[in-house]
Image (spheres, grey):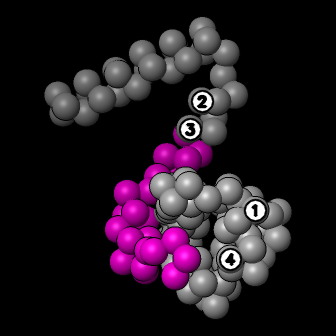
């Protein structure tokens, strides 16, 4: 099942990527779809999921469709992966080394079980 968080992540990635491929600034994209630059920023950083009509305008301007978002969302991080990555970002270097060693042991034990 597709999670909303994965859709938001995939869509934000796609909007930013397509905008850059098309050599558009956030300001230019905002003007073309009738949004503020701040709104485009929120779409690109994943803090906002657009209304359907906004999605359609973005898809038309940036030349993507729903299948692109669905494909990308299937590769988005799961909720648990996101939680783990957020914890890792808060760790000190020595804590990261210890965590890596612990994970390697857990994986090794799982492979030998």
Q: Is residue 71 visible?
A: yes
Question: Which region is colored magenta?
Answer: 60-84
Q: Residue furthest bottom?
A: 53
Looking at the image, is mark 2 or mark 4 earlier in the sequence? 4
Earlier-in-chain disc, 1 versus 3:
1
The Cα atoms of the two marked residues, 4 and 3, are separated by 35 Å
Depth-wise, is mark 2 or mark 4 nearer the camera?
Answer: 4
Q: Would you name the residue on which mark 3 appears?
A: 85
Figure quadrant of residue 87: top right
Tell me: 103 left or right of 22. Answer: left
Q: Position of residue 101 (x, y in %)?
A: 42, 15
- Disc sitting over residue 88 in the figure: 2
Above or below residue 1? Residue 95 is above
Observer-nearest of 82 and 24: 24
Secondary element type, mark 1: helix
Give the alpha-carbon distance from disc 2 to disc 1, as whole Å: 34 Å
Residue that mark 4 sits on: 32
Residue 27 is marked as 1
Kind of element beneath mark 3 = helix
Residue at disc 2, secondary structure: helix
Left or right: 58 in relation to 1: right
Q: Residue at x 55, y 18 (%)?
A: 96
Q: Are dots 4 and 1 in contact, CB under 8 Å?
A: no
Mark 1 Cα-neighbour bin, 10 Å: few <14, some 14–19, many ≥20: some
Q: CA distance from mark 1 to mark 3?
A: 32 Å
The residue lying at 52 percent from left, 82 percent from top is 60
Q: Marks 3 and 2: CB-CB under 8 Å? A: yes
Q: Residue at x 59, y 45 (%)?
A: 83
Other residues around mark 4 within 10 Å, as few (<14) / some (14–19) / many (≥20): few
Of the pair 90 and 51, the residue shown nearer to us? 51
């Amino acid at each position: 099942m597709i999670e909303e968080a994965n859709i938001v992540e995939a869509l934000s990635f796609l909007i930013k990527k397509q905008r850059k491929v098309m050599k558009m600034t956030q300001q230019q994209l905002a003007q073309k779809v009738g949004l503020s630059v701040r709104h485009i920023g929120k779409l690109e950083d994943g803090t906002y999921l657009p209304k359907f009509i906004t999605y359609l305008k973005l898809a038309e301007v940036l030349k993507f469709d729903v299948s692109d978002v669905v494909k990308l969302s299937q590769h988005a991080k799961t909720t648990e992966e996101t939680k783990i990555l957020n914890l890792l970002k808060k760790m000190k270097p020595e804590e990261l080394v210890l965590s890596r060693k612990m994970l390697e042991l857990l994986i090794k034990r799982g492979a030998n079980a």
